């Protein structure tokens, strides 16, 4: 028979070990590093392109220095580091939180610019990269979000050092949004969905009238109206096309055969 005293001692030792195990926590690798040193190291890692290492340090700085300007700066630099590591969701969450919590920050113009940049360079994915897909051939919501961020920046901070680049990007986005509408209109036209083609082309004409894509949009409208036996509307579209694009090759040559990339199945 087991000695009761010995049994009680063994149970007590086991409980002590178990409680010690439950109370253990992962060791903080930065526990002995000051917040200032940690922030300096994070910036150094980011400057060297080691964004994963920078993220670990910025996260610690943000938590330790909560409520300070250093914490705010760490939030901004975290958003940029996430952006550089293609972690778009985390980058947007971080920058949107900054904008919401610090509306009077002197760095607000940069925050808006970064928000636009993250959406502007939204990752196309592996098939987009392999096919060299352009911005007009993907979901346009990210481009619209980028445009809105850049627009707010240029309106609120017209003299910001980021405003000029934001305006250039806005012009590019407008052209790609218009091209996106025309791509859809072209798709519908070539499949005989003429009313749908007109509707999408009309968006490009009315919303993005200064875009080069308007030329093809008007041509699609004229051809679609012709297919639907609507000569007056066809002639109106042609008249606008000839007035605004008198040298358009579409008027003399129409659509030319386009070789499809390997991934395009329609």
Image (cartoon, helix red, strand yellow):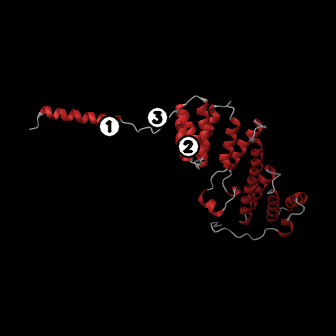
Q: Position of residue 244 (x, y in %)?
A: 89, 57
Q: Position of residue 167 (x, y in %)?
A: 77, 45
Q: Quadrant of residue 191?
A: bottom right
Q: What residue sits right under mark 3 in the picture? A: 32
Label 1: element kind: helix
Q: Do the residues labelled 1 and 3 touch (CB within 8 Å)?
A: no
63 vs 239, nearest the viewer? 63
Q: Do the residues labelled 2 and 3 touch (CB within 8 Å)?
A: no
From the viewer's perspective, is residue 32 above or below residue 218?
above
The residue sitting at 51% across, 33% down in the picture is 34
The residue sitting at 72% across, 56% down in the picture is 180
Q: Which quadrant: the N terminus?
A: top left
Q: In which quarter of the image is residue 218?
A: bottom right
Label 2: element kind: helix
Q: What residue sits right under mark 2 in the picture? A: 54
Q: Nearer the viewer, mark 1 or mark 3?
A: 3
Q: Residues within 10 Å of mark 1 (few under 14, many from 20)?
A: few
Label 3: element kind: loop
From the viewer's perspective, is residue 257 above or below residue 64?
below
Q: What residue sits right under mark 1 in the picture? A: 21
Q: Residues within 10 Å of mark 2 (few under 14, many from 20)?
A: many
Q: Earlier in the sequence, mark 2 or mark 1?
A: 1
């Amino acid at each position: 028979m087991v000695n009761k005293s010995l049994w009680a001692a063994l149970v007590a030792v086991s409980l002590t070990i178990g409680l010690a195990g439950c109370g253990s926590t992962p060791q903080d690798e930065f526990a002995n590093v000051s917040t200032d040193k940690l922030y300096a190291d994070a910036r150094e890692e980011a400057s060297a392109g080691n964004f994963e290492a920078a993220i670990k340090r910025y996260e610690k700085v943000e938590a330790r220095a909560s409520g300070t300007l250093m914490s705010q700066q760490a939030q901004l630099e975290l958003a940029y580091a996430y952006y550089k590591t293609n972690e778009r969701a985390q980058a947007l969450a971080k920058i949107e939180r900054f904008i919401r919590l610090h509306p009077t920050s002197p760095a607000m113009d940069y925050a808006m610019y970064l928000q636009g940049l993250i959406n502007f360079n939204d990752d196309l994915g592996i098939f987009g990269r392999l096919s060299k897909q352009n911005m007009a051939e993907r979901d346009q919501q990210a481009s619209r979000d980028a445009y809105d961020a850049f627009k707010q920046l240029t309106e609120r901070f017209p003299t910001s050092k980021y405003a000029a680049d934001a305006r250039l990007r806005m012009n590019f986005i407008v052209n790609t949004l218009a091209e996106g509408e025309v791509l859809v209109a072209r798709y519908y036209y070539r499949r005989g969905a003429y009313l749908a083609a007109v509707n999408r082309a009309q968006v490009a004409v009315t919303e993005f009238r200064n875009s080069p894509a308007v030329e093809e949009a008007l041509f699609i409208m004229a051809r679609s109206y012709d297919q639907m036996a609507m000569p007056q509307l066809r002639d109106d579209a042609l008249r606008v096309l000839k007035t605004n694009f008198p040298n358009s090759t579409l008027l003399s040559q129409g659509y030319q055969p386009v070789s499809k990339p390997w991934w395009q199945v329609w």
